[in-house]
Amino acid sequence: MYVLRFAANNIEVEEIAQTAQVLKESFVISPWLMLVPLAVVVLVAVKVPAIPALVIGIVLGFLSQIFVQGGTLIAGIEALQSGFTIATGNVMVDALFNGGGLDSMMFTVSMTIVAMTFGGILEFSGMLMSLMNQLLKVVKSSASLIISTIGACFLTNASCSEQYISIVVPSRMFSKAYQNMGLHSKNLSRALEDGGTLTSVFIPWNTCGVFIFGTLGVSVVQYGPYAILNLVVPLISIIYALTGFSIVKLTEQEKEKLAVDELKKEKVNEEVNLA
């Protein structure tokens, strides 16, 4: 019978003690600071929208840095923009706390903007409608529509090399078709995730594949067979589409609401064109 235990030679007691001492010297450590993440958890639990909940968490963290940690207003603003920086001399502490800020997210933000821009160009130039019309010629059922969505997401991942574009462009391309077939938008959302998000790691030149290789030094060929979640989920989604299992239809009330919203949208577009 095996007994789970820690081996003494595997625990760097001195390193842990040094790290704890550096943290005590560099920060004010108090259980009251747990109220900040706890507040965000409570807001999410009571179904407060994501953006207000995150903003409240940011504000509470900002105030904690100033009034608890003793930082200045300027330092707090700089941390929000470019991230927190500290030089303690302890490699572990510096690696753990240095970073963050809006600048660290600009790559993700810029790719989202590029994806939205690319989708807008495809839509308003008529290319998106042309592509959709060709695809819809072979789409005769809800199953073929969902499978086509998954396939389009994978092809976009391979051709555009970006996960965000593989979600945005097919969503714009197929959203109207889902409405016309009486399918709830959650079916489209699931197909986009299964076909776009999960398959992006299998494209070596996609940003996800490049990131994994650059971070872990493992190529797609090496880790691909072990990415069970990414392999199985799209197949399960296709099986669901073929069997009709968990495929949600629009109710009559939802169809009426969508029709009213579509009329309002067309009216606004006409007014904009006239102006």
Image: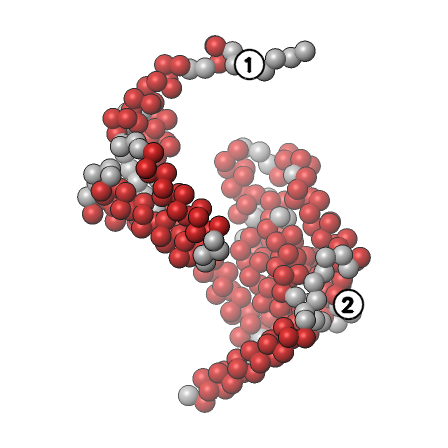
- Mark 1, residue position: 5
Residue found 52% across the figure and 14% down from its top: 6
Q: Quadrant of the C terminus?
A: bottom left
Q: Is residue 253 left or right of residue 143?
A: left
Calculate the distance from the C-alpha at mark 1 to the C-alpha at mark 2.
Answer: 57 Å
Name the residue nearer the viewer: 249 or 117.
Answer: 249
Category of crowding for the residue at label 2, using alpha-carbon neighbours closer than 10 angstroms: few (below 14), some (14–19), many (at least 20): few
Q: Earlier in the sequence, mark 1 or mark 2?
A: 1
Residue found 48% across the figure and 14% down from its top: 10
Residue found 55% across the figure and 53% down from its top: 163
In the rendered structure, which amino acid carries the disc numbered 1?
Arg
- Residue 113, quarter of the rendered image: bottom left
In the rendered structure, which amino acid carries the disc numbered 2?
Ser
Q: Is the residue 48 above or below the residue 223 in the image?
A: below
The mark found on residue 167 in the picture is: none
Q: Is residue 171 left or right of residue 90?
A: right
Please provide percent x and percent y for residue 59: 31, 50
- Mark 2, residue position: 141
**Residue extending furthest toward the bottom:** 274
Please provide percent x and percent y for residue 263: 56, 83
CB contact under 8 Å: marks 1 and 2? no
Name the residue nearer the viewer: 246 or 14.
Answer: 246
Category of crowding for the residue at label 1, using alpha-carbon neighbours closer than 10 angstroms: few (below 14), some (14–19), many (at least 20): few
- Residue 218, quarter of the rendered image: top right
Snapshot colouring: secondary structure
Residue found 65% across the figure and 54% down from its top: 195
Please provide percent x and percent y for residue 41: 44, 46
Q: Is residue 238 left or right of residue 121?
A: right
Q: Is the residue 97 above or below the residue 106 in the image?
A: above
**Label 2: which secondary element:** loop
